[in-house]
Amino acid sequence: MRTAKDYRVDSMRIEHSVFREGELSVGLTLPLLEAGNAIANSDEQLSVAKLADALGYRALWIRDVPLNNADYPDPVGHLDPWVFLGALAASTKQIALVSGAIVLTLRHPLHIAKGAVSVSTLSGARFILGLGSGDRPAEYAAFGKDAAERRDLYRRHWETVAAALGPAPRIIPDHAPPDAPDFFLLPREPAPIPLLAVGSGGQSVDWIARNAIGWMTYHREPEAQRARHGLWRAAVERLPSREFRAFGIAMRVDLSDDPHEPAKEIPLGYRSGRHAFAELLQAMRERGTHHVSLNLTSVRPVREVIQEVAAEVLPRFHSR
């Protein structure tokens, strides 16, 4: 039987296995689909997740896309993230599960906190709660929200989630009449669930550095990425405690079957052979990136690609 101490060790391990000072880890964004395929077979996705777990990838990232529309560039029918995360928690053993990201502004924060506790419990404390704000005004309207209030709504909801999942958990109710009882959240995790900012949510880098374990952003061309990382490092250095704060990148990768093909920029990432791809990751590590989540886009079979990366690239970065 697992003890509270076991869970604390797991919680520390999983956070640090994804984000560690001076190192870079690699994860995968689900669903993993071959190019041109927008239909995800759920059984196949769970099978691929098990394979990624066994191959030593450090994280599986799950997106939250509540609604699709003809103008939205992502045609994939994403599963509800909490349902998908629950299935992954039961199907995997070691790999971190990360929401990339729950749309904090379009969900009630207490429901988010309950979902986070549930996934953490089911997975044995392998969950990192990534939170974002969404970026489609029309989707805000569909949920009865004002996109102009995105920044304030994100901050208020973050405060409620952080209070419910923190080291001294407490519930911040929307309304508290005089006769309201004191609520609490069960099950109660022995250690706080890590909160990660995915995108900026309209907040400053200083706010993110103070409130999140790190900042996850999407790939930009190298010069722009260096400038963005410089802003982040400056914000982290302004923290009074000088605590470690992670920096991660979500990157699209089309891995060529020619291992020697040079890297070529594509929207939000690169097409590359494995040798140039490994050099790209090495350069990112040297610039201070701690994690890269791969959004694989290839005509090659998905399993073939993740097996090649695991065999030929990951050993350069996942030494421990």
Image: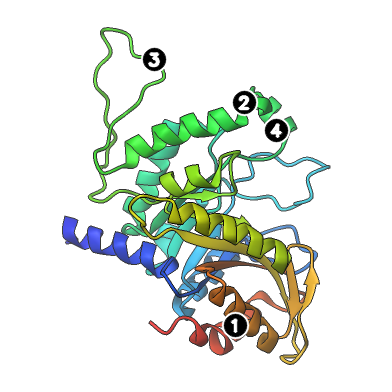
Q: Amino acid at mark 3?
A: His
Q: Is residue 86 visible?
A: no
Q: Amino acid at mark 2?
A: Glu
Q: Which mark is residue 139?
A: 4
Point out the tag, 1 or 4, that comes first from the N-terminus: 4
Name the one closer to the observer, 50 or 14.
14
| Quarter of the figure that contains the N terminus | bottom left
Point out the tag, 1 or 3, that comes first from the N-terminus: 3
Point out the tag, 1 or 2, that comes first from the N-terminus: 2
Q: Residues within 10 Å of mark 2 (few under 14, many from 20)?
A: few
Q: Amino acid at mark 4?
A: Glu
Q: Secondary structure at mark 2?
A: helix
Give x and y (percent) for residue 54: 45, 78
223 horizontally vs 284: left or right: right
Q: Secondary structure at mark 4?
A: helix
Q: Which mark is residue 175?
A: 3
What is the CA distance from the residue labelled 2 to the residue labelled 4?
A: 13 Å
What is the CA distance from the residue labelled 1 to the residue labelled 3?
A: 51 Å
What is the CA distance from the residue labelled 3 to the residue labelled 4?
A: 26 Å
Identify whether 304 is placed above or below 180: below
Q: Amino acid at mark 1?
A: Val
* Residue that badge 2 annotates: 149
Instruction: Mark 1 and mark 4 in contact? Answer it, CB < 8 Å.
Output: no
Residue 40 lies in what quarter of the image?
Answer: bottom right
Q: Secondary structure at mark 1?
A: helix
250 horizontally vs 223: left or right: left
Q: Which mark is residue 309?
A: 1
Q: In the image, which is nearer the foreground, mark 3 or mark 2? A: 2
Residue 133 lies in what quarter of the image?
Answer: top right
| Quarter of the figure that contains the C terminus | bottom left
Give x and y (percent) for residue 111: 44, 34
